[in-house]
Image (tube, grey):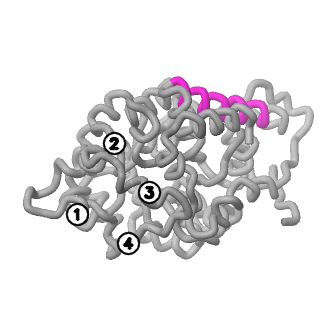
Amino acid sequence: MLPFLQDLAEQAARELDPRWHAYLETGAGAEISLHEAEQAWHTYRLRPRVLRAAGAASTAVEILGTRLETPVAVGPTAYHRMFHEQGEVATAAGARAAGALMIASTRATTPLASIAAAAGPWWLQVYLTRERAAIEGLVAEAAELGASALVLTGDTPVLSTRARGRDSVAQMPLDWHQVNLGRHLRPEVDAMRAIEQDPAASLEDIERLAELSGLPVLVKGVLRADDADACLAAGAAGIVVSNHGGRQLDRAVATAYALPEVVAAVGGRAPVLVDGGIRSGVDALVALALGADAVLLGRPVVWGLAAGGSEGVTTVLDGVTADLVEALSLAGVAAVGALSAADVIAARR
């Protein structure tokens, strides 16, 4: 982990309400997947090129028609008002200042319109709710507000048993839960049950969301080649390799190990993004060399948010991007798009 990220993590731990800090840092079960995530990236080794006059490397990328200054993006995380009074609005402003993509969560705690107004390029992460009117209304709203894609999370048919902070969400103010989804519910329904994840979500929902919104739909939570194929066949416009930050099925494979298999299955048909344990520009370089089009940061962005609001978020994104630029230059690579699988090998685990 980059030293400045460690400093931000420690500052967040000091400043946050212990309930909210536990919610942020917990994994599922024995937290095996949580603790493996970072180390898995360290098992790869780089093969630098020499005398290539790479100069100052470019980090610009284009994903689904959107040009970004950096492939380091804000992954979807919930309940940002736990961590800063301005919540997702501060996160969106910080991402915009860094020239980075933000993926806003279905479980955002500030109005979607306010997030959209503060953001640069942004997507909406989607949980399929028991009462479909809630998420369908939010998706339609996101399309009207300028979201350029949806990210359907597929690895949460039910919420796992978390190791820490089990009661944190239950202690949140009700209006944080309802600020977005609640507007799209019928008055007579049980609001909290209505916005729970629907365990009956299926591949058919990919095309339904695309038709409803007119937006491309990526599927997040993919760790297998056959799932990647199935999602693309069902209409997905992209894949996000993720094990939910070690928060869902404990002992799920680390994303650093799953990524090559998924990239091979996708075969260039759609963009592939990855999250999980990325804590430096060198980690990002490995992921990009293995075939990812962008990397998503979760907890590090929240550490920056908790420690410094929007400026803290920018600090995280700019700092990891700067580390990526240095790593590219040292590897003799002029631009992110010039990376290939030949630049990295798997060391013995």
Tell me, yes or no, whether the highlighted magenta stretch contains residue 217.
Answer: no
Badges 4 and 1: C-beta atoms under 8 Å apart? no
Residue pictured at 44% horizontal, 57% vertical:
218
Q: Residue at 55% of width from left, 76% of height from top?
A: 226
The picture places residue 110, in percent across and down from the top left corner, at 31, 38
**Mark closer to the chain start, 2 or 1:** 2
Which residue is under mark 4? 203
Picture coordinates of residue 134, whole percent (x, y): 21, 56
Task: Report the residue marked by disc 1.
Answer: 194
The image's mark for residue 38 is none
Disc 2 versus disc 1: distance between alpha carbons?
A: 17 Å
The CA span between labels 4 and 1 is: 21 Å
Q: Give the residue at the far right of this rendering.
A: 51
Q: What is the distance, in whole Å, between disc 3 and disc 1 at their CAs?
A: 24 Å
Distance of label 3 from label 2 (alpha carbons): 23 Å
Q: Earlier in the sequence, mark 3 or mark 1?
A: 1
Contact between marks 3 and 1 (CB within 8 A): the answer is no
Q: Name the N-terminal-most of marks 2 and 4.
A: 2
Judging by the rendered image, the residue that carries numbered circle 3 is: 218
User: Given contact means CB atoms under 8 Å apart, are the residues at marks 2 and 1 in contact?
Assistant: no
**Is 321 part of what is drawn in magenta?**
yes
Q: Is residue 203 above or below residue 332?
A: below
Marks 4 and 3, the one that precedes in the sequence: 4
Closer mark to the observer between disc 3 and disc 1:
1
- The residue at the far left in this view is 188
Q: Secondary structure at mark 2?
A: loop
The amino acid type found where label 2 is placed reads Thr
41 or 286, which is in the foreground? 41
Magenta stretch? 311-328
